[in-house]
Amino acid sequence: MARQARWLVKSSALGLVSLALQGAGSVTVGLLRYQAPGTITVSAPAYQARSAGRTVQLAGATEVVARGRVVELRSHGKVVLSGPRLQLVGPAPFLLTPPGRRYAGTLAITAKGALLPNLSLPLEAYVAATTGDEMPADWPAAALTAQALASRSYAEALPGRHAADGYDFCDLTHCQLFRGLAAQDARVTAAAAVTRGKVLGWHGTAIAALWHSTCGGRLAANDEVFGGERLPYLPGHPDRDAAGRPWCADSPHAHPWRVAYGGEAVTKALRTAKVLGAAEVLRGIQVTDTGDVALAVRVSGARTHALTGYALWMALGPSFGWGEIKSPRFTVAREGARYTFQGEGLGHLVGMCQWGARGRALAGQGWEAIARAYFPGATIIAGTRTPRRPADRPRPGP
Ligand SMILES: [Zn+2]
Ligand SMILES: [Zn+2]
């Protein structure tokens, strides 16, 4: 499953002040920021390109090229438009290469050495896309629907995460994985439509409804993982059926995991993450406080470094990969020069357990029951960023 790194920064999401960049109903996604392409080929049957007060009609493939802070649009090798900002509008989706994916919406492209494409699209289309990117389309409808509800809640709760850079969300797991129309599937679209305009709320406000892959049978409270205040709808609690079996028992990550590294590799990883100084030698790692996750860790080098289990997990992930030390629920043992990490679950373990949602759906639970199980006390309310359809408006009584 391509959802390894989502929980990376969902954490810092908690507590951000909402800031809507766009009008109601629309979100802007910053595409390909980590790829930083200098040239993108854009293709669509027919579209309009606007830049520096000029508009041209185009069909087929054109090249968009960054020249410093200027964006050039080239057709058949000739520059047809040039300016600080290029806007592409068309009725059909655009094929962008890289990344070789289709995107529906309006593109606004600026440049800063590399191209900075932003895609504006309706919130509901964004939710349908991210739901398909975050959960396999062949999972039960109730699980997909709960995922769509969580995705929309998250998007409504935290618009403008990247406001400083001119867009709402990035297209990586930092926000929500978004690959345009790549994961478009009728089952996902239907699941998103079931909850159209609905979000999980707390006292009338959309909540950042976090999710992760596999909890292993018990969810962790938000503060145990990310610090800060405990949020009433993100408590630590068991995720088990009446027989005591984890709802996520079918996950390939349901079993406890164990991984060992040589001291040199751990030292190098901790230096890279700046937990240890550049020349500091690792002498030991101890988990000093444990709750549902490793709460406090002591890393001993030339001096002692105190950090949270989540921070150590974050520090080692970039070097070892997120599929090795899979969650912040771990213990560390030292045997000679080797450090053995043992733990449970995959992901940050807060909020909705996706494999648990699947297990519950297969057992007959509906999407509302699933949402209530993972976000206790939260209520399902009308979001504020989905425009109402005429059918949604209150009608006069009989
Ligand atoms: Zn992001
Ligand atoms: Zn679970």
Image (spheres, helix red, strand yellow):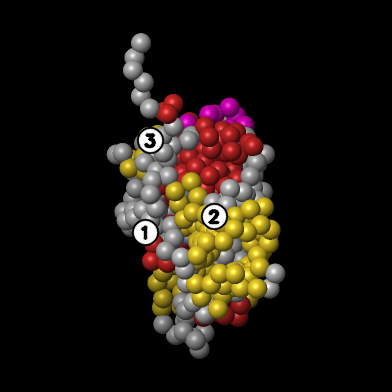
Residue extent of the magenta highlight: 360-368
Spot occupied by residue 314 in the image (x, y as percentages of width and height)? 50, 66
Tell me the residue that label 1 is attached to: 227
Q: Amino acid at mark 1?
A: Gly
Q: CA distance from mark 3 to mark 1?
A: 29 Å
Residue 89 is tagged as 2
Q: Where 385 sits versus 263, above or below?
A: above
Q: How many other residues sit within 10 Å of disc 1, few (<14), some (14-19) or many (≥20)?
A: some
Give the class, few, some or many, for how many residues have Cα within 10 Å of label 2's Cα (few <14, many ≥20).
some
Q: Nearer the viewer, mark 3 or mark 1?
A: 3
Residue 66 occupies quadrant: bottom right
Q: Is residue 128 visible?
A: yes
Q: Amino acid at mark 3?
A: Ala
Q: Of the residues tagged 2 and 3, which is closer to the observer?
A: 2
Q: Residue at x 35, y 24 (%)?
A: 394
Place residue 3 in its image quadrant. Answer: bottom right
Q: Residue at x 54, y 55 (%)?
A: 89
Q: CA distance from mark 2 to mark 1?
A: 43 Å
Residue 136: x %, y % from top left = 64, 44
Ranked by sequence position, the earlier of labels 2 and 3 is 2
Mark 3: C-beta under 8 Å from nearest atom of ligand 1: no
Residue 376, horizontal then vertical, whole percent: 40, 37
Give the residue type at disc 2: Val
Q: Which residue is mark 3?
A: 382
Q: Secondary structure at mark 1?
A: loop
Mark 1 CB within 8 Å of ligand 1: no
Q: Against 362, is 338 above or below?
A: below
**Mark 2, secondary structure of its residue:** strand
**Which residue is located at x 64 percent, y 62 percent?**
42
